[in-house]
Amino acid sequence: MTEPADWSRLRLHIVTGKGGTGKSTVAAALALGLASQGQQVLLCEVEGRQGIARMFDVDPLPYAERRIATGLRHDGLRPGAVHALHIDPESALLEYLSMYYKLGRAGRALDRFGVIEFATTIAPGVRDVLLTGKVFEAVQRNSRNKNATRYDAVVLDAPPTGRIAQFLNVNDELAGLAKVGPIRSQADTVMTLFRSPRTAVHLVTVLEEMPVQETADGIAELRSARLPVGAVIVNQVRPRDVSPADLDAAREDRLDDARIAADLRSAGIDPGAGLVEGLVSEARDHAERRALEDDQRAVVAELGRPTYELPRLAGGVDLGGLYELAAILKKEGLA
């Protein structure tokens, strides 16, 4: 759960986290949760993995916005929809050249010769400006964008925590590359959104030492770059359905083997063939794991950010699981 927080003013939710923490899953669940409030939501990805398509079981996404899901119906609200966009730097650069330099076919010719890939590889700051610029455009749409969907919220599945401040702080990335010109102007404009009250960077972690430490480091780097830190989402939390006394007993090898065997027999299960010993060993491992998680939960609490917890889904994450996580985020107030 979390301390009270009002996220209603946000237009841009940026989701980051150490690899393996499930940041893409959380981004998708957050988008579904916002859609369940009746909002039109754009879910963007920038890492080239087509993770959105896999999670929502749809065809690989082109460089075009596509409706992929409907939010949960709740409290009589008409659900909104989740649209998705896979942003790749080459397509973003072609669009940029078309918009600012009217290159059109000439831009596509550059693409065939590999010039665009070369440009975005040798100048990663330019690459990030192009990726973030497309996100900015989606957030800033208004009535003048007659043929484009206007979104109530945009959720960005961003790069991992170790690169998030560098990715978002496009001004510093361009410092040695572009002092003036359209691309520098675009970077400056993007930064006004990223540093505004309409944006928050949410960090996803699991209750393990390295991800929690990386989350703490990420918060410090974001604050140093004057980027707005949002919530901490603790993902893949194990059930807490064993009492502290039983956990202590399991960890200290004080479980009553005879009682466990009797309970198994009463349930019609033969306790032989090392079953009791195996169960006791698993109980000890679980108790030790829970103790480590509780230690890390205390560290997360000291980060001073609103915190939300999502359970580990026994069957893995499919579309039904995403809706389950979305409902939790909506109930807890993040979505």
Image (cartoon, helix red, strand yellow):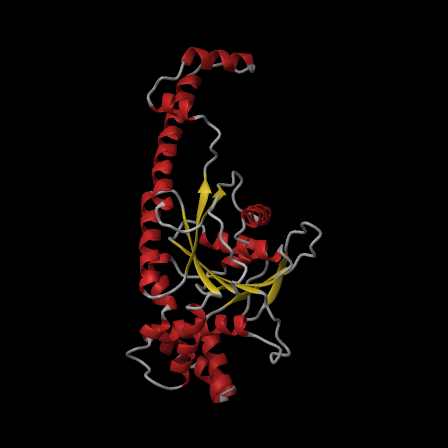
Q: Is residue 312 above or below residue 77?
A: above
Q: How many marks?
A: 0
Residue 333 placement, left or right of 181: right
Look at 41% across and 74% down and name the residue there.
129
Q: Is residue 247 above or below residue 214?
A: above
Residue closest to the eye, 110 or 189: 189
Residue 303 placement, left or right of 41: left
Q: Does the rendering let one see residue 202?
A: yes
Residue 270 placement, left or right of 284: right
Residue closest to the eye, 120 or 178: 178
Q: Is residue 192 above or below residue 35?
A: below
Q: Position of residue 252 (x, y in %)?
A: 33, 21
Look at 67% across and 56% down and name the residue there.
79
Q: Position of residue 82 (x, y in %)?
A: 60, 60
Q: Is residue 204 above or below residue 147?
A: above
Q: Position of residue 290 (x, y in %)?
A: 39, 33
User: Where is the C terminus found, in terms of image quarters?
Assistant: bottom right
Q: Position of residue 325 (x, y in %)?
A: 55, 47
Which of the 4 quarters of the picture holds residue 68?
Answer: bottom right
Q: Does the rendering let one see residue 89?
A: no
Look at 31% across and 57% down and name the residue there.
220
